[in-house]
Image (cartoon, rainbow, N blue to C red):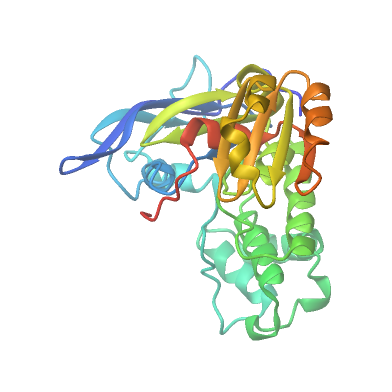
Amino acid sequence: MTPVPHSPIFSVKSLSKSYGENTVVRDLSFDIAPGECLGVIGPNGAGKTTTIRMCLGLTAPDAGHISYFPAGAAASALHMPKDALAIKERLGIVSQFDSLDPDFSCAENLLVFGRYFGLKDSVIRARIPKLLEFAALTHKADAKLSELSGGMKRRLSLARSLINDPQLLLLDEPTTGLDPQARHLMWERLQRLVQQGKSILLTTHFMDEAERLCNRLLVLDHGKKMTEGAPRDLIAQNLEPDVVEVYGAGALQLVDSPLKTLAARTEVSGETVFFYTQDSKRLLSALTDYPQLRTLHRPANLEDLFLKLTGRQIREDA
């Protein structure tokens, strides 16, 4: 996706947060322009959730500033947490876990939520059909949540976050737990919102989602910004263009074999050896001498970048 011209609608400056001796966010700065989707990716424990909580005024930062919606020279921006209520009137939020009311139908969930913003029922009712259509739930307007699939509930959560016509959406892993069809439908809806000029802050563990949706990416690890930029630019700047994955009986022995000289670097994950190379032809030719092994030749992708910057070790901490 083409980067959006820089003109921040939302800014985080020098944000830090510690719990005892554990610093979970370290001097973090970033911003979002109108009509831009910024993705935040990182392993468990990287500080993503704490950052989102501070942006929403749910956790107080130890240092730093969070500002929203600058109005130009004639008016100052809104600051979190001081202006929390005014900010949230213009935000749309989708959390990791659904908070829909099971006692209400789809349409009623939208109606009741709209009332929290002080909107008149006539205004809300006028918006509900378009939001249900956007969420592909027109046929489920009167259905209770027990009648909805997981994908439908996530789409309803997204529709509900739009009831106040927000300028900025904060989406915390919005497609977690969805099957591939439901994820692709959510992606199409999120892309439509960006095309309409909405700004989005998105956290995700899906690298294909981040690469597909985001104008820019922020990679966090141990609370620090590792890198930031457009997905394809980050891949080109940090990785070799070609990857050859080799797996099967005896694959791990290749790590210390002469084949390693044909790659810029090698990595091992489980029973698979990853060869990162500028030119894969010689390596692929040499691998024909190992017919018992299976190979996959592909271009470098965002997952390779993520693993290079944050490591392949599994993180169990939240």
Locate residue 117, reporting x and y percent: 52, 57
**Horizontally, is 254 left or right of 313 in the view?**
right
Task: Kindly identify the residue that appears in the image at 79 percent across and 29 percent down.
Answer: 286
Locate residue 138, reporting x and y percent: 82, 71
Residue 297 falls in image quadrant? top right
Q: Which residue lies furthest to the left in this view?
A: 20
Q: How many numbered markers are drawn? A: 0
In this view, 223 is above or below 153: above
Image quarter (top left, top right, bottom left or bottom right) of the C terminus: bottom left
Q: Which residue lies furthest to the front in this view?
A: 289
In this view, 210 is above or below 187: above
One can see residue 221 in this view: yes
Locate residue 72, reporting x and y percent: 53, 18
231 or 71: which is nearer to us? 231
**Horizontally, is 143 left or right of 54 in the view?**
right
**Horizontally, is 219 left or right of 178 in the view?**
left
In this view, 148 is above or below 161: below
Image quarter (top left, top right, bottom left or bottom right) of the N terminus: top right
Task: Kindly identify the residue that appears in the image at 66 percent across and 31 percent down.
Answer: 275
Residue 81 falls in image quadrant? top left
**Horizontally, is 222 left or right of 131 in the view?**
left
One can see residue 198 in this view: no
Locate residue 259, reporting x and y percent: 68, 27
Task: Kindly identify the residue that appears in the image at 71 percent across and 25 percent down.
Answer: 232
84 or 58: which is nearer to us? 58
116 or 205: which is nearer to us? 205
